[in-house]
Image (tube, grey):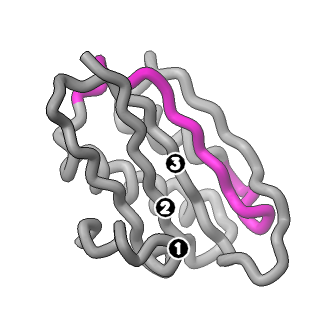
């Protein structure tokens, strides 16, 4: 087994618990599907949110998906002038059998952050 890092990001329509949880669920569902993730192989998840998203913890959406044993951390990103608003990001540490080519997922306006990876996001 080898340690893999999988990245993802999505923007939310608004700063509400419903929008944050829905966006997180959509992002994680896409990452799980595209990478065929097995929850028992997930080591940890680190979520970050831009300062304009504070109505809910993204980890709550993942817990609702049944990932109750995975360590998760939610952080607020530093405020940077002209940065992408209402953006959630995730870094997943995953134990995989080589060869494993991670598929990073960028959705909605977050595709502009990594156009090279957004192509694979679909």
The residue identified by callout 2 is: 9
Q: Quickly name the residue at label 3.
A: 90
The kind of secondary structure element at disc 3 is strand
Q: Quadrant of the N terminus?
A: top left
The vertical placement of 82 against 69, above or below, is below
Q: Is 112 on the left-hand or right-hand side of 56?
A: left
- Residue 14, position as x, y percentages in the image: 64, 75
Whether tag 3 and tag 2 are in contact, CB under 8 A, the answer is yes
Q: Is residue 9 left or right of residue 102?
A: right
Segment tinted magenta in the rendering = 38-56
Whether the magenta-drawn stretch holds residue 47 is answered as: yes
Q: Residue at x 27, y 46 (%)?
A: 102
For the point 84% across and 78% down, the residue is 81
* Residue named by callout 1: 113
Q: Nearer the viewer, mark 3 or mark 1?
A: 1
Pointers 3 and 1 in contact (C-beta within 8 Å) = no
The answer to whether the residues at label 2 and label 1 have Cβ atoms under 8 Å apart is: yes
Q: CA distance from mark 2 to mark 1?
A: 9 Å
Badge 3 or badge 2: first in the primary sequence: 2
The residues tagged by marks 3 and 1 sit, at their Cα atoms, a distance apart of 13 Å
Q: Is residue 11 above or below residue 21?
A: below
Question: On the picture, is 34 further left or further right than 63?
Answer: left
Mark positioned earlier in the residue sequence (3 or 1): 3
Q: Position of residue 90 (x, y in %)?
A: 52, 48
Please, what secondary structure does the residue beneath circle 2 have?
strand
Residue 114 location, x and y as percent?
A: 46, 71
Position of 44 compared to 4: left or right?
right
Residue drawn at (40%, 77%), measured in percent from left and top? 115
């Amino acid at each position: 087994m080898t340690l893999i890092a999988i990245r993802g990001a999505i923007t939310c329509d608004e700063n509400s618990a419903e929008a944050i949880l829905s966006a997180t669920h959509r992002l994680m569902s896409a990452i799980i599907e595209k990478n065929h993730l097995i929850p028992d192989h997930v080591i940890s998840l680190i979520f970050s949110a831009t300062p304009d998203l504070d109505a809910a913890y993204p980890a709550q959406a993942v817990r609702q998906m049944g990932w109750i044993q995975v360590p998760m951390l939610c952080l607020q990103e530093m405020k940077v002038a002209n940065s992408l608003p209402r953006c959630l990001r995730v870094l997943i540490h995953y134990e995989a059998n080589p060869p494993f080519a991670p598929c990073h997922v960028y959705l909605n306006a977050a595709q502009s952050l990594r156009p090279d990876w957004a192509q694979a996001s679909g």
